[in-house]
Image (cartoon, rainbow, N blue to C red):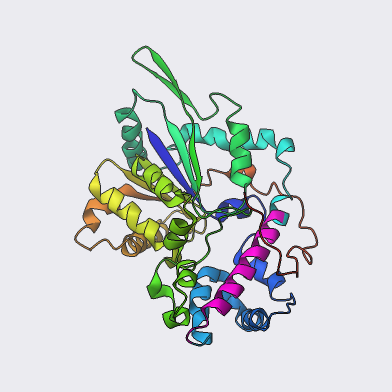
């Protein structure tokens, strides 16, 4: 049995790292460059900073400020942003000393052995039934990591050294120990193969910027970037997803630039009535005495997800009862592990000619 976690930037933020695009552009917009295209790009970000909290979406919209055929200029700006973002994130991840945090990491991942416990009785029954249906199998926890950092990898390296940490069960005279399965950085890492862009051409405000430069446009569309880089990360991640019995989304904003994945998950749900999706939402209202606000927001989140995944409304009743919203933080044991923020003035080098090192 495979339980797959889709991990987003909320994981690093939970650790106490300043890894939002809003954090980064505060540094990036102040840098200087000898390139007039990059200087204009940074001025635009400075003047529209609030839009760059969703930087991938904003990048697709930035094409409207360039002329037809200026694909090379756009790619220069996109590459500069990625190089400095990688350097910034390397600086951020260095704030955690994983070798000193083994006990906290152990505490956090122990919660995987009781994954269904925080849910209401009916939902817990449904999820426990999935486990029962696979009781003659080992449970593998797989991870599709949308972050560029190695923070999750560092945690999982420690977890894999502790047999039984993720739980175990007995059945038919056999003892099954849950374990870490596959890990895939679907958008690359701070060391290479970074994928940074939009979901599809409809999210590019002015596609004719790339007239005569189809390669530049492909490097703005995530799936095409993955195909060009020929690391098969998209295929590997999709295979992990398709093999899952439960999918757990943690720390992801469910934005339009990752719509491909919401479509894939909705299709995965619709194809098999025994599959379940868990979505962590940190900003849920308290349940309190009267649960209407909590239940209303849960309903809204489920339906927003199904809309993003392009499910027709007549399919909703077949899927909605298997989408579970939770405010419970399964990674509470590693919350705020990071050292206090260091001076980030030099986090991103002003030398835009530096290239991200190959993995």
Q: Tell me where residue 145 appears, x and y as whole percent.
A: 51, 49
Q: Residue at x 21, y 57 (%)?
A: 315
Q: Is residue 61 magenta?
A: no
Vertically, is 149 above or below 108?
below
Quarter of the figure with the N terminus: top left
- Is the stretch drawn in magenta largely helix, strand or loop? helix
Q: Tell me where residue 338 appears, x and y as whole percent.
A: 71, 49
Vertically, is 226 above or below 337?
below
Q: Tell me where residue 241 appears, x and y as whole percent.
A: 38, 45
Q: How many marks?
A: 0
Q: Nearer the viewer, residue 141 or 235?
A: 235
Q: Is residue 59 visible?
A: yes
Q: Tell me where residue 264 appears, x and y as whole percent.
A: 34, 54
Q: Residue at x 26, y 52 (%)?
A: 319
| Range covered by the magenta-colored residues | 68-90
Q: Quadrant of residue 55?
A: bottom right
Q: Nearer the viewer, residue 283 or 224?
A: 224
């Amino acid at each position: 049995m495979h339980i797959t976690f889709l991990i987003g930037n909320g994981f690093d933020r939970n650790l106490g790292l300043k890894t939002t695009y809003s954090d980064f552009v505060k540094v990036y917009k102040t840098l200087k460059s000898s390139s007039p295209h990059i200087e204009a790009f940074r001025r635009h970000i400075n003047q529209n900073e609030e839009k760059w909290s969703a930087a991938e979406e904003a990048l697709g919209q930035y094409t409207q400020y360039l002329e037809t055929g200026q694909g090379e200029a756009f790619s220069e700006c996109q590459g500069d942003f990625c190089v400095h973002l990688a350097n910034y994130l390397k600086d951020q991840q260095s704030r955690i000393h994983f070798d000193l945090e083994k006990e906290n990491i152990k505490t956090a991942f122990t919660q995987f052995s009781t994954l269904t416990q925080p849910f209401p009785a009916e939902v817990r029954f449904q999820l426990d039934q999935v486990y029962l249906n696979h009781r003659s199998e080992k449970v593998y926890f797989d991870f599709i990591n949308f972050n560029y950092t190695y923070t999750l990898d560092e945690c999982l390296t420690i977890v894999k050294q502790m047999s039984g940490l993720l739980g175990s069960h007995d059945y038919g005279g056999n003892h099954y120990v849950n374990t870490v399965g596959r890990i895939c950085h679907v958008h690359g890492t701070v060391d290479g193969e970074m994928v940074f862009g939009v979901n599809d051409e409809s999210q590019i405000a002015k596609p004719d910027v790339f007239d005569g430069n189809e390669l530049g446009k492909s490097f703005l569309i995530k799936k095409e970037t993955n195909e060009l880089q020929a690391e098969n990360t998209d295929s590997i991640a999709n295979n992990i997803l398709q093999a899952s019995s439960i999918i757990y989304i943690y720390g992801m904003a469910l934005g339009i630039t990752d719509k491909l994945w919401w479509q894939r998950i909705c299709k995965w749900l619709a194809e098999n009535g025994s599959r379940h999706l868990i979505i962590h939402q940190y900003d849920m209202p308290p349940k309190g005495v009267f649960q209407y606000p909590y239940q209303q927001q849960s309903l809204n989140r489920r339906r927003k997800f199904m809309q993003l995944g392009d499910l027709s409304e007549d399919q909703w009743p077949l899927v909605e009862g298997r989408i579970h919203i939770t405010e419970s933080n399964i990674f509470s044991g590693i919350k705020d592990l990071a050292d206090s923020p260091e001076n980030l003035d030099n986090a991103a080098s002003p030398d835009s000619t530096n290239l991200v090192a190959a993995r």
